[in-house]
Image: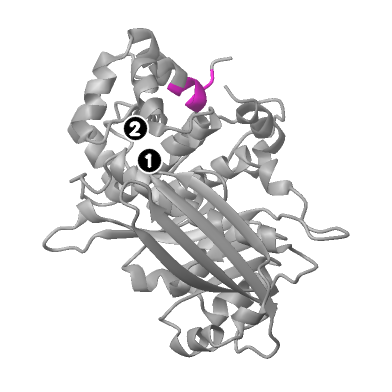
Amino acid sequence: MPSSLISTIARHHDHMPGDLPDDAERLITLAEVLDRLPDPRRTRGRRYRLGALLVLCTTAVMAGASTWAAIVRFAAGLDPVLRELIGLARAIPRTCTLAHLLASLDGDAFDAALGAWLQLQHTDLLTGPVGGAGPVKRDAVSVDGKTVRGSRTRERRAVHLLAASIHRTRTVIAQRQVDSKSNEISAFRPLLEPLDLTGKVVTFDALLTQHDQARFLIEEKNAHYIALIKGNHPTLHAQLKQLPWSEIPLMAKTRATAHGRDEIRRLKAATVPGLPFPHTDQILQIVRRRRVLSTGRLTIERVYALTDLTMHQATPAHLAEHVREHWGIEALHHVRDVTLREDASKIRTGSTPRIMASLRNTALALAELAGWRNHTAAADHYRSNPDHALDLIKPTT
């Protein structure tokens, strides 16, 4: 098990939400956090501890389970010793038990607890350099939304979730449910308000590029921003396109071949005073040239962005990395859809679609902390070795 899953918890146990012990030597595990969530069930008639059921669901999702029946089958196939370790020694829960529990859980409390715990696992990453005598690569957080398409019914639109994830990782540290994609704007501030963003860069797409969001990050969170500009800001977008980019020298260039594509990215940056957007210092132009290796098809895309970071705070290479890493949250969403079959899931009742999305986020983050980059391989491994998954959730040593 990665050392961060022990050392970081030990150092930062007192920052976890809820009524946790003051003993600095006691390790706060994910299982303990799950056990301290608000239990929506009536006290009378409870057969299983809340934490035991949630540990079972998390372990099963890490092994690739995507339905209630799959979670129950996973529990039935566990060694009795592991079931006892989880807290299910007496009996295996039925699908209706799990369905009723997750449908009635408080989604905000669930996401807040999971996000806080996962952020602690990256404390070393999130306490890197934030200033100094020259430009530095700052820690960064992406904000983006995703619709859980399989949750749509005739009476209810699909669940839409706005999330914040740490760059270069598959770790979601905050998530909120909103009525629709257009409501992401009003959810931006509540999503980020609990997070310590001092000195960090927040990246977001054009929909969230709003004056109030920029002021909130700079003036209240002491953070920085990189905001993408697209056609939904027609006046500003046109103004950026008309700048004399041909006269501005190329400042950063990267090339990568992956997923059957050869991609070249070029970045130019310019300081333009007086732009009608709060605290903007530099304007960026990113040109992405993609070639599909199998067909030779070529596409060229120009993207514009605004940032408050000055040339003395971040180099063009740093800015290019931040923009490229922003799309990592979309890669995370893709894994949830394709590998964990989120959009195919027909689980729709109450809070269940959101809770299952949070469990998938947690499964991906835990697998990455354990060193996995291919989650299909990780799910296969944890299906065959559930004790290894359980070690990440409820360490026994």
Q: Nearer the viewer, residue 106 or 133?
A: 133
Q: Which image quadrant is residue 54 in?
A: top left
Q: Is residue 392 magenta?
A: yes
- Look at the picture and state if 255 lies above or below 7: below
Q: Which residue is at 80% across, 68% downward?
A: 312
Residue stretch in magenta: 389-395
Query: Residue 191 appears at what percent x and percent y?
Result: 50, 62
Identity, as a three-letter code, of the amino acid under mark 1:
Arg
- Secondary structure of the residue carrying tag 2 is helix
Pointer 2: what residue?
61
Q: CA distance from mark 2 to mark 1?
A: 7 Å
Task: Point out the tag, 2 or 1, that comes first from the N-terminus.
Answer: 2
Task: Residue at 34%, 23% (x, y): give it.
Answer: 380
| Residue 52 in sight here | no
Q: Residue furthest front?
A: 296
Residue position for label 1:
360
Q: Is residue 342 left or right of residue 280?
A: left
User: Percent from the top left, x then y, of residue 77?
Assistant: 26, 14
Q: Decide whether residue 236 is among the magenta residues.
A: no
Disc 1 residue crowd, few under 14, some 14–19, many 20+, Cα 10 Å: many
Q: 356 left or right of 202?
A: left
- The location of residue 261, given as percent across then percent down, is 41, 49
Disc count in the image? 2
Query: What is the residue that sits farthest to the right in this orientation?
Result: 133
CB under 8 Å between callouts 2 and 1?
yes
The quadrant of the picture occupied by the C terminus is top right
Q: Residues within 10 Å of mark 2 (few under 14, many from 20)?
A: many
- What is the secondary structure assignment of the residue under circle 1? helix
Question: Is residue 154 toward the left or the right of residue 258 in the image?
Answer: left
